[in-house]
């Protein structure tokens, strides 16, 4: 079983706080995929949270006492709020008067992204939704809350889907309970189209240092193979401005180790300042998701502006990873399992060291089936499972970008099927007849997170390859596995047979091992 503690590499910890060494100015501190991280400190404990995109459970929460060693706590929502359907982005943690708040972005049932809010007295037990707080035209995303001398303000990104308007960061006062806007909204910043921002602006956070409020924000393209995310800063004396952008923006850019950094939270601990943010690892780009990094933030003594000393030469390329071995002996699913919320509904049960995965319903354009996935933390790995159910449903191992783009190997009746779904089209790459279809072991290996090879076995020891007949070397090239908003997932799947209605898969085990 996975350790309760997530292994990280220590920078240097002293009694006055946490201090990055001169040799390391940028490194991953939370394993796996966690974009848009928010972090707060309450009574000496740091809590971090990040985007889930379309994957449930929604918004994982981690805790730490040093910003370096993080443990998983729970999810904000085990079940998504009823008013939402997808796009679970940018959860912003806030603590006020003994209550934890989470201001989050989600797509409403009509397709419009809005900002909601949830509350809890005990963050260990998750949050209770309080519904929508901001609806603003075609889109309102990326909330950040700041307490200015006892008055709560909320900022957010607007007009990202309005071609006739520039993207802006807007602000408004909040009611004292933090659950509603108060007064008129006002403009905070406007994105420039002729600068590094390239018309984009989002992922803001606000801190005070000296006489100024400083707003770190992200500009340019956030995600996917064409991303060019960067971080800038502006400052003002009050929330309502005027806000002045730094002449030397951007402060933080990508390098050969970590690409497209941005959308984070700055905070002070002791005498030092840090920025927790996301970036793509160069290894496996663009197939793996955005990881959470930590960098120390410095202040120019003459100008007062913040700056970073991050370069490729002092960026730690180490990707945090830990193997998974699930023998399904727990009473419920382990926390590493995720599912695609809008694409299907399913049931799971664990009994006698077996996982039963049952597909209930899937969308009409879902050509993959219902998947239960883990997040690959490194691009070179092997996954294995044992399929222990003979029926006409297709079931086995899957590499999953979306329900419209995936690759897998599955057992269907007495057949073994190697397949690829590309742009919603199911493509059969090979099909073998099995003399002994019961208790089949399946194995799949990934190189660079998209070059895939598959094998099967009757005893889990002697393996036979199953080749892609459409490729001379037999490998499956998963060029369909990069998705703009999240990284590829991998795991188990079942796809109901339309003729018989059989929709169940039984798995004896699942393992993921990294090829270090």
Image (spheres, rainbow, N blue to C red):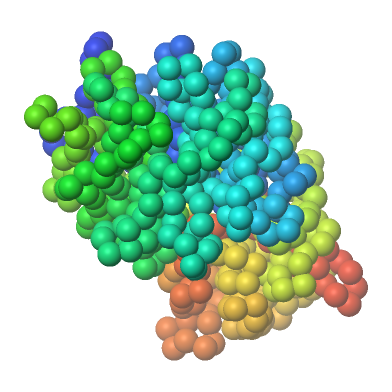
Residue 313 picture location, percent across and down: 14, 48
* In the rendered image, the vertical position of residue 275 relative to residue 99, given as above or below: below
- At horizontal 42% and vertical 13% (from top left) the residue drawn is 44
Q: Which of 359 and 430 is in front in this view?
A: 359
Percent coordinates x, y for residue 433 in the rendering: 71, 81
Q: Is residue 299 left or right of residue 274?
A: left
Residue 290 appears in the figure: no
Tell me if 454 is positioned left or right of 129 in this view. left
Q: Of 288 and 491, which appears nearest the observer?
A: 288
At a point 49% along the width and 67% down the height, the residue shown is 164
In which quadrant of the rendered view does residue 320 lie?
top left
The foreground one among 270 and 466 is 270
Q: In which quarter of the image is residue 244?
A: top left
Q: Say whether residue 179 is left or right of residue 392.
A: left
Residue closest to the far right: 500
- Residue 267, compared with residue 253, is above or below; it is above
State whether residue 390 is above or below residue 474: above
Please state which of residues 175 and 29 is positioned toward the viewer in this rendering: 175
Q: Quadrant of the N terminus?
A: top right
Q: For the point 65% across and 67% down, which residue is it? A: 403
Residue 85 appears in the picture as rendered = yes
Query: Residue 135 location, x and y as percent?
Result: 64, 47
> Measuring 33% from the left and 38% from the top, which residue is drawn there?
242
Residue pushed farthest left? 302
């Amino acid at each position: 079983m996975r350790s309760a503690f997530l292994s990280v590499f220590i920078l240097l910890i002293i009694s006055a706080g946490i201090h990055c060494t001169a040799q390391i100015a940028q490194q991953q501190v939370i394993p796996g995929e966690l974009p848009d991280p928010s972090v707060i400190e309450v009574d000496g404990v740091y809590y971090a949270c990040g985007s889930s995109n379309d994957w449930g459970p929604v918004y994982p929460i981690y805790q730490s006492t040093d910003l370096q060693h993080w443990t998983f706590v729970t999810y904000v929502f085990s079940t998504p709020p009823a008013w939402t359907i997808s796009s679970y982005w940018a959860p912003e943690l806030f603590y006020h008067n003994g209550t934890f708040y989470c201001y989050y972005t989600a797509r409403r049932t009509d397709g419009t992204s809005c900002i909601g809010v949830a509350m809890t007295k005990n963050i260990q037990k998750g949050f209770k939704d309080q519904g929508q707080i901001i609806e603003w035209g075609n889109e309102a995303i990326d909330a950040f809350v700041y307490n200015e001398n006892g008055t709560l303000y909320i900022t957010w990104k607007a007009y990202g889907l309005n071609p006739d308007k520039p993207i802006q960061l807007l602000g408004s006062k909040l009611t004292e309970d933090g659950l509603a806007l108060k007064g008129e909204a006002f403009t905070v910043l406007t994105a420039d189209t002729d600068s590094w921002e390239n018309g984009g602006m989002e992922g803001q956070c606000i801190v005070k240092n000296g006489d100024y409020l400083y707003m770190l924000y992200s500009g340019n393209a956030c995600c996917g193979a064409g991303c060019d995310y960067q971080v800038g800063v502006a400052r003002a004396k009050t929330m309502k401005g005027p806000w002045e952008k730094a002449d030397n923006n951007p402060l933080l850019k990508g390098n050969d180790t970590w690409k497209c950094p941005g959308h984070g939270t700055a905070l002070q601990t002791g005498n030092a300042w840090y920025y927790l943010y996301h970036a793509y690892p160069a290894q496996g780009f663009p197939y793996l998701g955005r990881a959470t990094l930590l960098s120390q933030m410095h202040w120019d003594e003459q100008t007062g502006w913040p700056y970073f000393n991050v370069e490729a030469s002092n960026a730690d390329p180490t990707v945090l990873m830990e193997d998974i071995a699930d023998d399904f002996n727990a009473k419920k699913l382990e926390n590493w399992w995720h599912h695609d919320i809008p694409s299907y509904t399913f049931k799971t049960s664990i009994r006698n060291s077996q996982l039963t995965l049952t597909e209930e319903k899937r969308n009409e354009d879902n050509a993959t089936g219902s998947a239960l996935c883990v997040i690959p933390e490194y691009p070179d790995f092997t996954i294995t499972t044992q399929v222990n159910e003979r029926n006409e449903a297709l079931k086995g191992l899957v590499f999953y970008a979306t329900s419209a783009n995936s690759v897998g190997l599955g057992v269907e009746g007495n057949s073994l099927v190697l397949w690829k779904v590309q742009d919603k089209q199911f493509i059969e790459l090979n099909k073998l007849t099995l003399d002994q279809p019961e208790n089949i072991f399946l194995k799949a290996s990934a190189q660079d997170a998209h070059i895939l090879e598959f094998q099967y076995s009757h005893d889990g020891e002697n393996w036979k390859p199953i080749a892609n007949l459409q490729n001379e070397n037999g490998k499956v090239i998963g060029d369909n596995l990069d998705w703009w908003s999240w990284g590829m997932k991998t795991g188990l799947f079942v796809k109901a047979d339309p003729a018989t209605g059989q929709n169940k898969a039984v798995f004896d085990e699942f393992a993921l091992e990294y090829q270090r």
